Image (cartoon, helix red, strand yellow):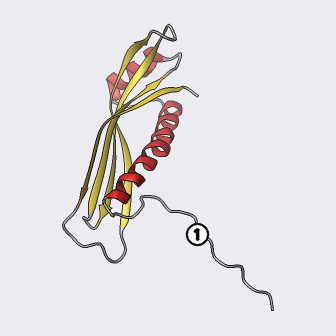
């Protein structure tokens, strides 16, 4: 996997003023803030350092969780990725999909722990077990 490191640098959670009742929606979204090239001495290679924010908002206005961090990504296309980022503030689709899926997996687990501490609902659906229907 081309992701070689993930560091959380900021974690912030707030519970809103409104009481929790009725249907709540948790919307999570990763945002890429910056991309730059860095040396990785242990690998004797250059990697992309991708700064991100991962935001989860609970609607209607009952809480938020924000995680800021850095992801290290190894690719042979550093120059073209940096050129595209500098020009359009975008990543190539294949790299973007890999990074966003990775951030969803890692950050949603962290958000779930924080949400529990703030007494907010989990930001993702958990499987539910129900009894088998009896055949008549």
Q: Which residue is mark 1?
A: 128
Image quadrant where residue 58 sits:
bottom left
Query: In the displayed structure, does residue 17 sit left or right of residue 124?
Result: left
- Picture residue at 39% right of the left edge, 64% below the top: 121
Residue 8: percent from the left, percent from the top?
36, 35
Q: Nearer the viewer, residue 44 or 80?
A: 44
Callout 1: few (<14), some (14-19), or many (20+) C-alpha neighbours within 10 Å? few
SS class, disc 1: loop
Q: Quadrant of residue 27?
A: bottom left
Q: Is residue 8 above or below residue 76?
A: below
Q: Quadrant of the N terminus?
A: top right
* Image location of residue 80, percent across then percent down: 45, 18
Question: Residue 41 lies in what quarter of the image?
Answer: top left
Residue 15 image offset from top left, x and y in percent: 24, 60
- Which residue sits at x=42%, y=21%? 48
- In this view, 52 is above or below 23: above
- Residue nearest the observer in this picture, 31 or 4: 4
Give the residue furthest to the left: 17
Q: Is residue 107 above or below residue 63?
A: above
């Amino acid at each position: 996997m081309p992701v070689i490191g993930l560091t959380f640098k900021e974690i912030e959670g707030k519970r809103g003023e409104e009481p929790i009742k009725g249907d709540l929606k948790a919307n999570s979204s990763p945002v890429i803030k910056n991309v730059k090239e860095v040396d990785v001495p242990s690998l004797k290679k250059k990697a992309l350092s991708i700064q991100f924010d991962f935001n989860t908002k609970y609607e209607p206005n009952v809480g938020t969780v924000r995680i800021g961090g850095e992801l290290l990504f190894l690719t042979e296309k550093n120059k073209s990725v940096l050129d595209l980022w500098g020009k359009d503030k975008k990543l190539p689709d294949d790299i973007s999909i890999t990074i966003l899926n990775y951030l969803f997996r890692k950050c949603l687990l962290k958000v779930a722990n924080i949400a529990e501490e703030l007494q907010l609902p989990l930001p993702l659906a958990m499987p539910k077990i129900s009894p088998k229907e009896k055949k008549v």
